[in-house]
Image (spheres, rainbow, N blue to C red):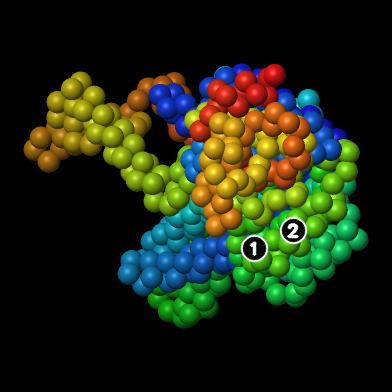
Amino acid sequence: MSDIFSFRRFGLLFKKTILERPVQLFGLTALSLALVFFSYLIGKALGDFESGQFASFIVGIVGGGSFLASMVFNYFSSNAMGSSFLTLPASHFEKWLCGVLITGVIYVVVFLLFYRAIDTMFVSIYHNGLDPNGPFYKQLYEQVGILSYDDYVPQKGIHIFFIFAGAMLLGSLYFNRVGFIKVALILCVLWSGLYLINLLIAKSMIPNTENALPFLQAYINAGERKSGVITLPLGMARTVTYIFNYFLPASLWLLTLQRLREKEF
Amino acid sequence: MIEIKNMTFGYSRKKLLYRDLSLSLGSGRIYGLLGRNGAGKSTLLKNMIGLLFPKSGSITVNDFKPGKRQPSFLETIYFIPEEVYVPSLTIKQYETLFAPFYPRFNTTEFSRYLDELDVRTDEKLNKLSFGQQKKFIIAFSLACNTPVLLLDEPTNGLDIPSKKQFRKLIASVMNDERMIFISTHQIRDLDNLIDQIVIVDEGRLLLNEPVATITDKLVFKTVGDISEANAPLYKEDTLKGLAVVEQNHHAEESKVNLEHLFNAVTENPVLIRQIFQS
């Protein structure tokens, strides 16, 4: 049997991983989905329909997904559990793939299906609640629709999820305890640091820069209530987008495999 | 079977726990690893299983490099740490999920070991007492039939009858293909069980000898007066007189007292080396 990958061994490992801690994995997923449901309701109540859709999508994919990612390799809070995980006869690649499958595939699919279901339900309730004979029926009907996963916010949410989840997976192999909080703090510091550096660079080149976030644009105050936006040239913008959307998450997820190999406990 | 060559290990580069440690352990024996608290007994075991990696030198276990943690290697070795981990599963569920990873796992033997250690319950394992959990893991590890079994303080948490059951069970499962390496500071628990004694102190290997060789070279006895003893390597007042460890010049027969042996070796490492090299 190969020391890198065997379908039989991977199947056993996957079954073991799921059934060994069902409360943690299923409970967390259920909790995340419940939060999605309530944030949809709260967002809708506090703002408009779209706010509820966006807020709940981000809570579910970025919040729930990252939290689950931080739990997948959470074996190192005790000496016994960490030893048991690392000495189980399965390859590093299989152990890593298990984490990737649970976080990056299963959770995402479950979340997207659940989200589509509640979104469809809420939108239907809204549409059914409208008076077809009312003066603005068509306008009100078209104002609210099912969130398309190709829209800007879901797309950004998914990209951010892959960065955060990758960081959480990696972080849980560095921090044996309270990995989620530690990685979240590091991400906050890194994100703020990057933002400030980006802003300082933009300000040093264009003195009346007001803001420079995201990293593709700088917002300029041109005086007398006039403002403008400077956008990176297309080629460079593509490179930055590529780095943030693909290179960074892929690196984080792959580094997790490397870290798992090097993990001493 | 286990070959350690010039191993250096430390949790930091500045403070090394082991320097140039070389050790060779063969199969068909039960080894007892003795050392003070913090001497690095658990660390040595973790290096053998591949949970820690040597800073320099090498370790091979049945021709595998433990640090790679290949499945084909991990199938042949089982490590029981001092604190054991059992998930929220019943015995049957645990067996179903974990046993298939070990190709030599024997269900009948597992059942027998559980009976012998008096672990029979339908409760979830994590609800059992620590001692029961430990006995369960011991039974499981033995049923895995791995050629190498590493036990870190296995009798910690076991009650007196369980310690006896443990010794009986370990002795009964030994065969020529198997090697059991037990690290402990509760040396009385391992009386009559160990075939070979390994003593480490301050990062050095002080002794790695079979019990038979030890009793050939040293004698353990109780004397009335120190003058009766011939330059003892170790002495201790007891109710019966003075317990001493001395060089066995006259081929006297005696039984190893592990505690006294440990003190004699750690207090006279140079002399002990000379005695065993002669």
Q: Is residue A167 left or right of residue A3?
A: left
Chain hosting mark 2:
B
Judging by the rendered image, the residue that carries numbered circle 2 is B166
Q: Residues within 10 Å of mark 2 (few under 14, many from 20)?
A: many
Query: Element type at marker 1?
Result: loop
Quarter occupied by the C terminus of chain A: top right
Looking at numbered disc 2 in the image, what kind of residue is underneath it? Answer: Phe
- Does B236 appear above or below B27? below
Residue positioned 66% across, 42% down in the render: B220
Q: Is residue A5 left or right of residue A229?
A: right
Quarter occupied by the N terminus of chain A: top right
Judging by the rendered image, the residue that carries numbered circle 1 is B158
Percent of width and height locating residue B17: 50, 30
Q: Are marks 1 and 2 in contact (CB under 8 Å)?
A: yes
Looking at numbered disc 1 in the image, what kind of residue is underneath it? Answer: Leu
Percent of width and height locating residue A198: 28, 29
Residue positioned 35% across, 25% down in the render: A232
The mark that comes first in sequence, 1 or 2, is 1
Chain hosting mark 1:
B
Percent of width and height locating residue A54: 43, 57
Percent of width and height locating residue A89: 74, 42
Q: Quadrant of residue B133?
A: bottom right
Which residue is nearer to you in this view: A90 or B175? B175
Are the residues under badges 1 and 2 in a single subunit?
A: yes
Residue A41 visible, this angle: yes
